[in-house]
Image: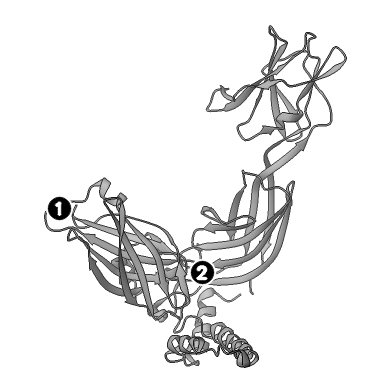
Amino acid sequence: MKTIEEKLKEHKQTLEMLQAPTALENRLRDALHNVPDKKKNKKKATSWIASAAAVLILVIGVYQYPALAYYGEKFFKTNWSSLSFSEVTEQGYGQKVDESITLRDGTVVTINGVMADDNVFLMYYTMDRPVGIEFTDEDFRRYGFDKLKGFLTDSKSQGNGGGDGKNKSQFVGQARFEPVSPFSRTLTVTFYEWINDERVFYPISFKFEANKAMKSIIKQELDQSIEVDYGTIHYDSISASPTSTLIKGRYEFEDYPRTYGQYKLYVNGIEVQYKGKSGRMPEFELEFDMLPTDRINSIELVLENFLGYQKIEEPISLASPSDRSIKIGDEKLWIRSVTKTRTGYDVVIARREFTKLKWDTITVTAGGKVIPVSSISESRPWDLGNNNIMRENTFSFNTMDKPESLLLEGFTYIKTYNKRISLPVEK
């Protein structure tokens, strides 16, 4: 198959044959502002808006990021998000900005440069205190970035980090934002600081050169799904860029559990580091590290484990309680003790931390009757040694007859699935 370098080179040649529309932002903005608003022109205006939207979609679909750079093998083996901007520019990438604002106390905030792709917008900045004044840990609670705005762009901040610069009076940072539109010619980021319990805002505007931005390596729709006990997990798209790999999907469940699963991504059999999951139910977004290679032969996504449900058909004997585990399906429970009390009997049950019994369905059989649970204690740790810590609860039953068996409807637990799907790769 072709390497990504070869595909990008072909795409670059195609883009070079296209002329990017001049002053596209201003022309579209003016056109949208001049839509007729009189009733007699309503039909005409609706038709015009539909036509304009169609043209806009066509232009966006063709234009994308212009002047796509030709990336070599070294490009794909560099962890760009971990570099300072000076290190980025040494490699010949990124866009210099060098725009500054001065805070009330004389601290200078400078946007040094930016890098962008379809997954994230990275902004490199420095903060310089007046000579002789050093930063303290408390200082950084005062500062932050609000949204990044521009034409067709309203990107939320996704956090930032950094460390000392050339001395304790300088901080060198990197801020992450949601992706921006390649049609934005000017971007404005708002820096803020807390002064007397109020936020003071400092907008910083700079020219954005889309031809310095990086395009995604892989971006395609998916139609893959995995069945789990709670329903179906759908995978809708994958977008792999030099900074990260994102897989978007959605859950199709009747009930949404609090605990979710563990995922692994393999490229050519090499595991890509998992960074985390985000999104608003029922949608989700899995983030992994950048691609480990420029030649992709296979991409596999593995659902290692997910919340499962185990139904219990048979009663559990309480005749000989012990600290030995009772295997039920793929999971284990422990009946630790059955103890006579002043008001009845207590049964202590232990389980793994993320195993949850259906409390309201727990009963025991005693004296030929089914006795419901009357009270349940708070869970407490039970240490088996070797850092193997279970959770146990005391279940109280109001009966003078010794319980013979425990009746459970079922429990939720972290179930091992190890379901693997292959994502399509263009040959």
As displayed, is residue 342 above or below residue 326? above
Mark 2, residue position:
294
In the image, 133: left or right of 58? Answer: left
Quadrant housing residue 99: bottom left
Query: Which picture quadrant has residue 68?
Result: bottom left
Residue 14 point in image, percent of width and height: 53, 88
Circles 2 and 1: CB atoms closer than 8 Å: no
Residue bearing the label numbered 1: 133
Dot 1 crowding, Cα within 10 Å, few <14, some 14–19, many 20+: few
For label 1, the SS is loop
* Residue in the foreground of this view, choosing between 147 and 285: 147
Q: In the picture provided, is 224 more to the left or to the right than 220? A: right
Nearer to the camera, 24 or 323: 24
How many residues crowd around disc 2 within 10 Å: few (fewer than 14), some, or many (20 or more)?
some
Q: Is residue 182 visible?
A: yes
Residue 6's place in the image compared with 48, above or below, is above
Q: Amino acid at mark 1?
A: Ile
Residue 381 relative to residue 321: left or right? left
Q: Which mark lies nearer to you, 2 or 1?
A: 1
**Disc 2 marks which amino acid?**
Asp
